[in-house]
Amino acid sequence: MAEWTSAWLAYDDVFSHGSKAGASPGRMREMADRLIAALDAPDVADPPVFLRPAVDVMRRMARGMSPQLRDRYIETTQGYLKGTVQEVEFRARRETPGWRDYLDMHILAGATWVLDTVEYGQGFDLTHELAVCRELREARRIAAEGVVMVNDLFSFEKEYFTGDHSNIVSSFMVTESLSLQGSIDRLCELIQDVERRFILKQAEVLAGSLPRTLYVPYAPNPHAPSWASTGQGRVGAAAPGPRGGGRSPDRRHPYTYLLTSRSGPGRSS
């Protein structure tokens, strides 16, 4: 899993803003088609050099997957590449999608794929359960929303400094004319709502008839770190109160965004 993630992080940089593939929808589609063809038959594929790391890891991962999980994994990998092509097309047209369209695009372009990777790592194959349990499918969708939103909260600064505005924060700023702090607050509201909806949906799944051996109960972690490092800056959900740098405890959204420039100290926005 670590090798697979490392390979795809490298590809993600190749596909991102500033690269030839990231600037050309046609080039991105061609690269995506070649990668899917290689992953679909990893045991016989002779891919280009730059695709060999992913194909090699997929060949080894597939040995530990059921045919059903492998097919789903290939499908979600195709989704990742399809969503990435859509992102490149928006970038080429200099368009910023609304946050809901952006969310759908990035759930396709990676979030469900991340969940399938976790499923593989846990030794599960939920293909049948997802097919028969509507509540589980809905929980998966909510979890995918959370993956995208939390990623965007903590990756915004890196993307901002590289000129890549494919981010929910940027979408709020462009399409809804919100300030940076207003956009961060809005995203944090959505993250809180995702957590609330996931806990409610978990209760529905637990009340159902799926085998209880599949359940890994979720609960929010009150001791989660307030700050995360993102390159040369900081982005965080600051704890409320004077020492935390956030808003007063009676406010609904105690989050302050700190944007640290490459050449100077950070300041609250």
Image (cartoon, rainbow, N blue to C red):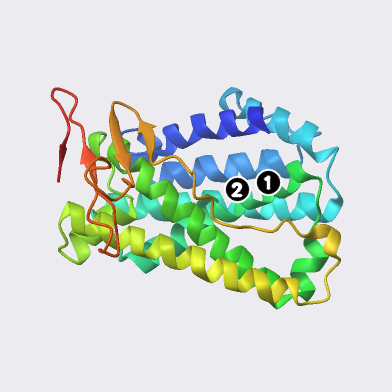
Q: Residue at x 63, y 52 (%)?
A: 115
116 sits to left or right of 257: right
Q: Position of residue 161 (x, y in %)?
A: 24, 34
53 sits to left or right of 132: left
Which one is nearer the viewer's eye here, 269 or 118?
A: 269
Q: Residue at x 17, y 61 (%)?
A: 178
Pointer 2 local density, CA inside 10 Å: few below 14, some 14–19, many at least 20 = some
For the N terminus, give its image quadrant.
Answer: top right
Q: Position of residue 262 (x, y in %)?
A: 19, 25
Which residue lies under the disc numbered 2? Answer: 114
Residue 83 shows in the view: no
Q: Position of residue 208 (x, y in %)?
A: 78, 77
Which residue lies under the disc numbered 1? Answer: 118
Q: Residue at x 21, y 44 (%)?
A: 242
Amino acid type, residue under disc 1 in the picture: Val
Q: Is residue 163 above or below residue 97?
A: above
Q: Position of residue 254 (x, y in %)?
A: 29, 55
